[in-house]
Amino acid sequence: MKRSGPSFQQEQVKLKRCGECHGRGVVKPMFYEMPCTGCNAGGMVNAETGEALSLEDLVLQLRLEANRLEEDNQRLRRDLMECSGPERGYGPLGARYTGD
Ligand SMILES: [Zn+2]
């Protein structure tokens, strides 16, 4: 059976850092790290409800977030190239101090 339309929404949900694990996805109550139950180990929760996303949603949302960060990263790299000019890698930030 073929259905039209997506099986789930590809809409980006606003996320915020999970308060229980501070975005790490793991908590360390004693000596061992455990997957955080507050966010399904995703590190992010729904910014509006503060609730963990289902695993299916979590994968989708983290992928969308990863895509967004990737685009950000590429844009920043382009900007950086323009800033540092043709001799990149040897700009002021690439200079090394070798003093004692
Ligand atoms: Zn968490």
Image (cartoon, rainbow, N blue to C red):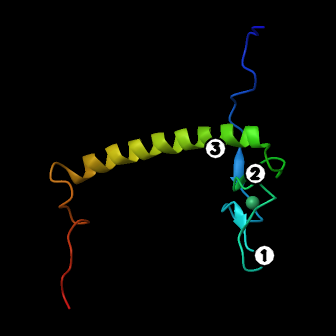
Disc number lying in front (1 or 2):
1
For residue 29, the mark is 1
Measure how far apart labels 3 and 1 are at the Cα level.
Answer: 25 Å
Structural crowding at the residue carrying mark 3, measured as other residues with C-alpha within 10 Å and reported as few (<14), some (14–19) or many (≥20): some
Q: Secondary structure at mark 3?
A: helix
Residue at left offset 33%, top offset 43%: 78
How far from the left and from the top, in percent, is residue 99?
18, 87
Pointer 3 residue: 62
Instruction: Specify whether 64 is left or right of 13.
Output: left
Along the line of sight, the residue nearer the viewer: 64 or 79 = 64
Is tag 3's residue or tag 1's residue first in the polypeptide sequence?
A: 1
Which amino acid, by three-letter code, is at mark 1? Pro
Give the position of the C terminus as an image quadrant. bottom left
Instruction: Find the residue positioned furthest to the left.
Output: 87
How far from the left and from the top, in percent, is residue 84?
23, 53
Q: Secondary structure at mark 2?
A: strand
Measure how far apart labels 1 and 2 are at the Cα level.
Answer: 20 Å
Instruction: Specify whether 80 is left or right of 15.
Output: left
Which amino acid, by three-letter code, is at mark 2? Val
Is tag 3's residue or tag 2's residue first in the polypeptide sequence?
A: 2
Measure how far apart labels 3 and 2 are at the Cα level.
Answer: 11 Å
Is tag 1's residue or tag 2's residue first in the polypeptide sequence?
A: 1
Residue 55 position by quadrant:
top right
Disc number lying in front (3 or 1):
1
Mark 2 beta carbon near ligand 1 (under 8 Å) = yes
Structural crowding at the residue carrying mark 1, measured as other residues with C-alpha within 10 Å and reported as few (<14), some (14–19) or many (≥20): few
For residue 45, the mark is 2
Which amino acid, by three-letter code, is at mark 3? Leu
For residue 78, the mark is none
How far from the left and from the top, in percent, is residue 72?
47, 44
Structural crowding at the residue carrying mark 2, measured as other residues with C-alpha within 10 Å and reported as few (<14), some (14–19) or many (≥20): many
Give the position of the N terminus as an image quadrant. top right
